[in-house]
Image (tube, rainbow, N blue to C red):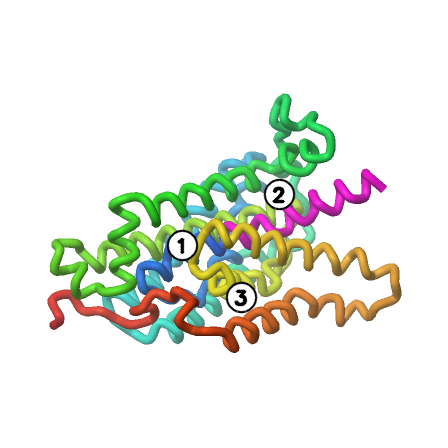
Amino acid sequence: MEDIIISVAQRTLIAGTPLLLGTIGEIICERSGILNLGVEGVMSIGAVTAFIVTFYTNSPWLGLYAAVFAGMTISMVHAFASITLQSNQVVSGLALTMLGLGISGLVGKPYVGKPLEIKMQTFPIPGLADIPYVGPIFFDQSPFFYMAILLAVATWFTLEHTRIGIKIRSTGENPKATEAQGVHVSLIRYACVLAGGAFSGLAGAHLSVSYSKSWIEGMTAGRGWIVIALTIFALWNPTRAMIGAFLFGGIFVLQYLLQPMGISPNFLAMLPYLTTLVVLLIIGLGDHRKLNAPAMLGEPYKRGER
């Protein structure tokens, strides 16, 4: 029984890791006032890029770096459209999703069914990994898990307790006042969109070189949309995002635990997305004043405009 509990907890953290990485990136992006609905496409680009680079180099770390770069590169499309061209951010984000899924499906087609010779191995932390119960769960994980936790805490600290964090938050709340203080609003927003792309690319890399060691079209399986819901669930707070991400990770694992009970596989496959809708419904029925959403989220801003 002890082994089963530890195994389920480990798998929950593994399944929640890409959700946490993607949510951190989306929080950074949205706190600057830019809505990015292209997370699914960027994650897919990150996954296929990491797989291909790892396939040829046998280095998951090179695959990880390449995925981050690819995520930032394709996110530049959304940044240019929504910040420079001031286009509708919803339309631009949806277009980015379709673009990312299309490119990844095309580029990755020759690699379907080809497994990696090596994937990102778990890294047990000496001493801590030997602690009963807690050690195997939290301290014998993939480097992606450790990075996700550290990046979540670092992002929270940066947004709440640093000068650059104040600039990001004020850009999302009142860009006119922020510009009056000498801050380049467009530059801040560009940086945040690219940071969001880097995190989404990293989340995609986790799927193809750590969670599994293969590439299949549709590997992201709607996780990008769950990330957007988790951003709202977390109230744009990276520390709350950790709770939400691993909660949804547990729901992914629950699918496999309930299969032996004879429950319809189709219903089980719906669980994460059904839960997403329920969460959004509950949030929507609550007090909108407590959501803490950035005031200018999704609103274009032209420099010098009064």
Q: Nearer the viewer, residue 135 or 62?
A: 135
Q: Residue 75: x, y in percent? A: 38, 58
Amino acid under label 3? Trp
Mark sitting on residue 210: 2
Q: Are marks 1 and 3 in contact (CB under 8 Å)?
A: no
Which corner quadrant holds the C terminus?
A: bottom left
User: Is 86 above or below relative to 73?
Assistant: below
Task: Determine the residue positioned at 51% across, 42% down.
Answer: 149
User: In this figure, which residue is indicated by the disc labeled 3?
Assistant: 225
Q: CA distance from mark 1 to mark 3?
A: 14 Å
* Neighbourhood count class around disc 3 (C-alpha, 10 Å): few under 14, some 14–19, many 20 upward: some
Which of pointers 1 and 2 indicates the residue nearer the eye?
A: 1
Which residue of the protein is positioned furthest toward the bottom in this rendering? Answer: 285
Amino acid under label 2? Ser
Q: Quadrant of residue 162?
A: top left
Q: Is residue 42 left or right of residue 118?
A: left
Q: Are marks 3 and 2 in contact (CB under 8 Å)?
A: no
- Circle 1 sits in a helix, a strand or a loop, which is it? helix
11 falls in the magenta region:
yes
Q: Residue 56: x, y in percent? A: 56, 39
Q: Which residues are magenta?
A: 1-21
Task: Determine the residue positioned at 58% across, 65% down.
Answer: 222
Q: Is residue 204 left or right of residue 267?
A: left
Q: Residue 158: x, y in percent? A: 35, 45
Mark sitting on residue 91: none
Task: Determine the residue positioned at 30% across, 57% down.
Answer: 169
Which of pointers 3 and 2 indicates the residue nearer the eye?
A: 3
Q: CA distance from mark 1 to mark 2?
A: 20 Å
Amino acid under label 1? Gly
Q: Which circle's residue, 1 or 2, is located before the other in the chain?
A: 1
